[in-house]
Image: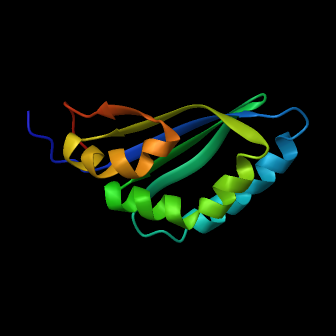
Amino acid sequence: MTIQDTCCTIAPYFKIKEGQLEAFKSLCEKFVEKTNEESKCLYYGFSFDGEQAHCREGYEDAEGLLAHLDNVSELLEESLKIANFLRLEIHGPEEELEKLREPLAELKPQFFVLEYGFRR
């Protein structure tokens, strides 16, 4: 099946270190503020379950996702001092994922290939 959708999503799950929840949430506000300026961001937000956090985010394409990571690189470094990745997923069509595999290899994400679906 041909997929016309080029949307790429990144799904980081964090385990926040003990006593660092409020500091992490403070960083979330900064992430949202910086990301709000990105033209290729489709949606962005943080959700929580106790000391775990998830960032729900989607971009028009691989280029948008890479631009985002560049834009928030300093904040991400800061956040990883008080939290660890539980897992990191990247979702999108294979043509877009191919553009992400090498640049994101250091983060060791799990890649999910979009094969069926649509986007309005």
Q: Locate residue 117, reporting x and y percent.
A: 21, 34
Q: What residue do we see at 38% from left, 61% from top?
A: 64
Is 5 on the left or on the right of 68, as rendered?
left
Q: What residue do we see at 78% from left, 30% from top?
A: 51
Is 71 on the left or on the right of 20, as rendered?
left
Q: Quadrant of the N terminus?
A: top left
Closer to the camera, 54 or 102? 102
Judging from the image, the colouring scheme is rainbow
Q: What residue do we see at 91% from left, 36% from top?
A: 19
Q: Locate residue 34, reporting x and y percent.
A: 61, 67
In the figure, residue 89 lies in which quadrant? Answer: top left
Q: Return the residue found at the far left.
A: 1
In the figure, residue 116 lies in which quadrant? Answer: top left
**Residue 120 shows in the view:** no
**Residue 40 shows in the view:** yes
Closer to the camera, 40 or 70? 70
Tag count: 0
Closer to the camera, 42 or 19? 19
Q: What residue do we see at 82% from left, 34% from top?
A: 17
Q: Locate residue 11, reporting x and y percent.
A: 50, 38
Q: Locate residue 67, reporting x and y percent.
A: 44, 64
Residue 102 vs 69, above or below: the answer is above
Q: Return the residue found at the far right.
A: 19
